[in-house]
Image (cartoon, grey):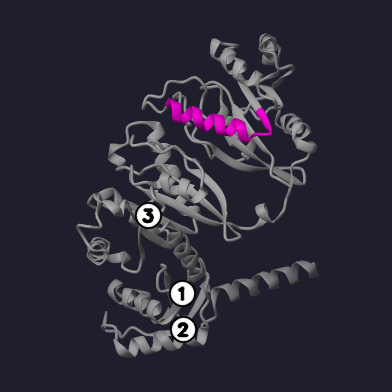
């Protein structure tokens, strides 16, 4: 059964993004009083009964975009309308009908699809009586909701269900329940992230423009490649925090950082003809801080390939990002689709690496040999020792070393151990989280065991009473 689609449409500033976040149950789209914040189509699966439907947020109809992207925004709105099975025509009860609402109504009257007229901002029952004027728009009953005050959600979902094809959402099949590979596409402005997304999705999924800052939200694009579900997250171009001037720019940066945190693999886009900037370094540091597998994607390589070899450019990156010398690189031209599939294949490989577990015996043998090959320096008149090593988690691979003192192991020696682990095991290209723990002295009882014993004795005493 095909997934039904529901699109929210209306003039600017009626609360479309607020309604979208409210129905989705989490903050996805940026909500701001500034008209025209939403430009791309933003989608999310919405649970409904035993199934789900896909909800789409759109830009405001009839707005003149400050960056001359009006035609691009309108095209995205039309694509959402064409794809939708049900349309939510959103109006603002507090302002009442305005001429732009009439224009939206005129556009929707010629569409042979169910249109639900929804009055937002009905924050209390007293405002429900003010919806009478909206009946003149010609879409029948006006349904009162308030995304801010959480009023009318169940009624609206019931109406959506009744108007879906066959009156039913899509069943919770493998397409929704399967955990997709999540790819965060990040980088500074105008590095070709949206072009890359459209190439992957094989459709105009996000607006592509030479205007810096075209993408504002983090846009999730779900598609399938070779039978596998992939979720590509297009993010706003990152800029220096000191250059942020508006709330929208601040929210865009926050969404980009959140996308990194929830991603399985990060594709860090770099503009081949431009030098590495401080923003690139800060972004790479944030990726490393969150232990995310990453790929340096050098886009627009066609503009530079005749001037410099890939190896030479790779050496430049290694010197620029010495802490990320294990991160693989990919040289692409997203506009022409060159090497895009290679990036996908590499991302899937990195995800597999980050999911691997190492046998405890093999791990201890490698650590022991590494310490024999290069002994750590004596510190505080003590020779650093590792008694035992074990892997405790994956995604990222997490190794715990029990030692005679974590503070005896300097950062340089820890980097040596991490490099040894990458060289010997099947995760050479992903970050490894290394924890050093002090081994308890001989004869000492672990605190956790002591607490458990005390709790057990207390329980037994209580039962006796």
Q: Quadrant of residue 284?
A: bottom left
Question: Going by the image, does 372 lie left or right of 70?
Answer: left
Where does label 2 land, which residue? Answer: 363
Q: Which of 168 and 263 is in front in this view?
A: 168
- Reply yes or no: does residue 78 show up in magenta: yes
Residue at coordinates 69% horizontally, 56% vertically from top-left? 174
Which stretch did the figure color magenta?
Answer: 70-87
Q: In the rendered image of this protein, does residue 434 appear above or below residue 248?
A: below
- Which label lies toward us, 2 or 3? 3
Where does label 3 land, which residue? Answer: 268
Residue at coordinates 26% horizontally, 51% vertically from top-left? 303
Mark 3 falls on what kind of element?
strand
Q: Which of 417 and 112 is in front in this view?
A: 112
Does residue 102 appear in this view?
Answer: yes
Q: Would you say the residues marked 2 and 1 are in contact, meaning their CB atoms lie under 8 Å apart?
A: yes
- Which label lies toward us, 1 or 3? 3
Question: Going by the image, does 112 lie left or right of 314?
Answer: right
Mark 1 falls on what kind of element?
strand
Measured as percent of width and height from the top left, residue 233 is found at: 49, 48
Residue at coordinates 50% horizontally, 59% vertically from top-left? 264
Pointer 1 local density, CA inside 10 Å: few below 14, some 14–19, many at least 20:
many
Measured as percent of width and height from the top left, residue 211 is found at: 34, 34
Does residue 17 appear in this view?
Answer: no
Where does label 1 land, which residue? Answer: 399
- Marks 2/1: CA–CA distance: 9 Å
Mark 2 / mark 1, whichever is N-terminal: 2
Pointer 3 local density, CA inside 10 Å: few below 14, some 14–19, many at least 20:
many
């Amino acid at each position: 059964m095909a997934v039904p689609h529901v699109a929210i449409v209306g003039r600017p500033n009626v609360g479309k993004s607020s309604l979208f976040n409210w129905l989705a149950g989490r903050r996805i789209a940026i909500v701001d009083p500034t008209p025209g914040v939403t430009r791309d189509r933003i989608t999310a699966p919405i649970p409904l009964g035993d199934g789900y439907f896909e909800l789409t947020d759109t830009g405001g109809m009839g707005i003149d975009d400050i960056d001359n992207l009006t035609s691009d925004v309108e095209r995205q709105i039309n694509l959402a309308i064409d794809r939708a099975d049900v349309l939510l025509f959103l109006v603002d009860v507090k302002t009442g009908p305005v001429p732009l609402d009439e224009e939206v109504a005129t556009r929707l009257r010629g569409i042979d699809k169910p249109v639900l007229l929804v009055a937002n901002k009905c924050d209390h029952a007293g405002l429900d009586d003010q919806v009478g004027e909206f009946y003149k728009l010609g879409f029948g009953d006006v349904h009162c909701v308030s995304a801010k005050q959480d009023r009318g959600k169940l009624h609206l979902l019931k109406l959506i269900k009744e108007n879906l094809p066959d009156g039913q959402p899509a069943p919770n099949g493998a397409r929704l329940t399967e955990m997709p590979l999540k790819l965060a596409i990040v980088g500074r402005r105008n590095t070709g992230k949206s072009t890359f997304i459209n190439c992957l999705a094989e459709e105009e999924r996000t607006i592509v423009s030479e205007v810096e800052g075209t993408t504002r939200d983090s846009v999730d694009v779900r598609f399938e490649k070779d039978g596998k579900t992939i979720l590509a997250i297009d993010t706003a171009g990152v800029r220096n925090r000191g250059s942020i001037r508006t709330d929208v720019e601040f929210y865009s940066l926050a969404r980009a950082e959140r996308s990194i945190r929830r991603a399985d693999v990060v594709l860090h886009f770099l503009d081949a003809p431009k030098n590495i900037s401080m923003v690139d370094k800060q972004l790479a540091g944030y990726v490393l801080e969150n232990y995310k597998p990453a790929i340096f994607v050098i886009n627009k390589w066609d503009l530079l390939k005749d001037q410099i070899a890939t190896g030479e450019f790779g050496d430049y990156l290694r010197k620029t990002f010495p802490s990320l010398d294990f991160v693989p690189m990919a040289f692409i031209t997203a506009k022409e689709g060159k090497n895009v599939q290679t990036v996908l294949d590499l991302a899937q490989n990195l995800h597999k690496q980050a999911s691997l577990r190492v046998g405890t015996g093999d791990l201890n043998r490698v650590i022991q040999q590494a310490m024999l090959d290069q002994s750590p320096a004596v510190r505080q008149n003590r020779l650093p020792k590792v008694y035992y090593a074990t892997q405790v988690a994956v995604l990222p691979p997490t190794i715990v070393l029990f030692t005679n003192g974590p503070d005896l192991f300097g950062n340089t020696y820890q980097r040596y151990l991490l490099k040894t682990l990458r060289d010997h095991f099947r995760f050479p290209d992903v970050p490894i989280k290394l924890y050093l723990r002090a081994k308890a002295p001989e004869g000492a009882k672990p605190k956790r065991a002591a607490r458990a014993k005390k709790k057990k004795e207390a329980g037994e005493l209580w039962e006796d009473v």
